[in-house]
Amino acid sequence: MKTNHLVFTGLAVLSLFAVTAIAWPGRGEAQRPDVPVPPLVAAVRTATEPFKRVEVAKAADYGLFHGCVSGPQGGAMGVHLVNGSLVGDGVLDPMRPEALLYEVRNGQHELLGVEYVVIAEAWHAHSEAPPVLMGQLFHYVGSPNRYGIPAFYELHVWAWRANPGGTFADWNPTVSCDEFTADITSHEAHR
């Protein structure tokens, strides 16, 4: 009788562990498998799958913009590879993000998500309202700012890394800049 109870208890504990391991988003997962993927996340994954290899991103005219961006209270945005011509065109296209976000770990670049960016003046040349992309309202960043660029609108999409703060939040507490050491002066993106 005791043996059956121990076996049942052991199986229950193992089942609980397995369900928790499947449902809990890990470092490399973008979302729990039981939660529907937002349409913008699906679009980002489709558009950026090739950019999981940083060499492909660089060949597509994405270049390092400044260094790794860490948060004011914790977490980071990561390393931004930016396509300067997309930033300056005043257009937002879910299939053509202006910036790709990476984290460097063990010398490897891991794609985390994207940042859509549009210069405020270019946006307001054709629209009075702030930008919205597939239902997501952009954040406004005034000038001067820490990036040294004119006022802009931006939206982060954590498509390849889960963000406990939200899929569209700026800062991700699971991201770190600790291992990024590149010389930014020789790799800046085209502006």
Image (cartoon, rainbow, N blue to C red):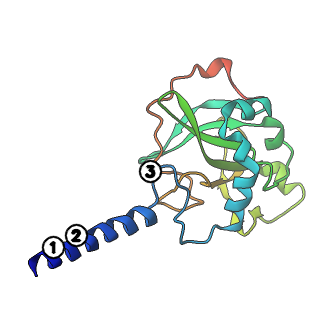
Residue 86 located left or right of residue 1? right
Where is residue 27? Give x, y as percent.
46, 50
Which sits in the foreground, 129 or 38?
38
Where is residue 34? Give x, y as percent.
53, 72
Residue 23 located left or right of residue 92? left
Please name the residue shown 71% across and 67% down the image. Answer: 39
Instruction: State whether residue 97 is above or below residue 3.
Output: above
Q: What residue did someone put label 3 on? A: 173
Mark 3 Cα-neighbour bin, 10 Å: few <14, some 14–19, many ≥20: some
List the single residue furthest toward the right.
Answer: 126
Instruction: State whether residue 172 is above or below residue 180.
Output: below
Please name the residue shown 80% across and 34% down the image. Answer: 60
Q: Which mark is residue 10?
A: 2
The image quadrant of residue 62 is top right
Dot 2 falls on a residue whose secondary structure is helix
> Which kind of residue does numbered mark 1 sit on?
Leu
Q: What residue did someone put label 1 on? A: 6
Dot 1 falls on a residue whose secondary structure is helix
Tags 1 and 2 touching, CB below 8 Å = yes
Instruction: State whether residue 80 is above or below residue 165.
Output: above
Please name the residue shown 76% across and 63% down the image. Answer: 133
Report the Cα–Cα distance between label 3 and label 1.
Answer: 40 Å
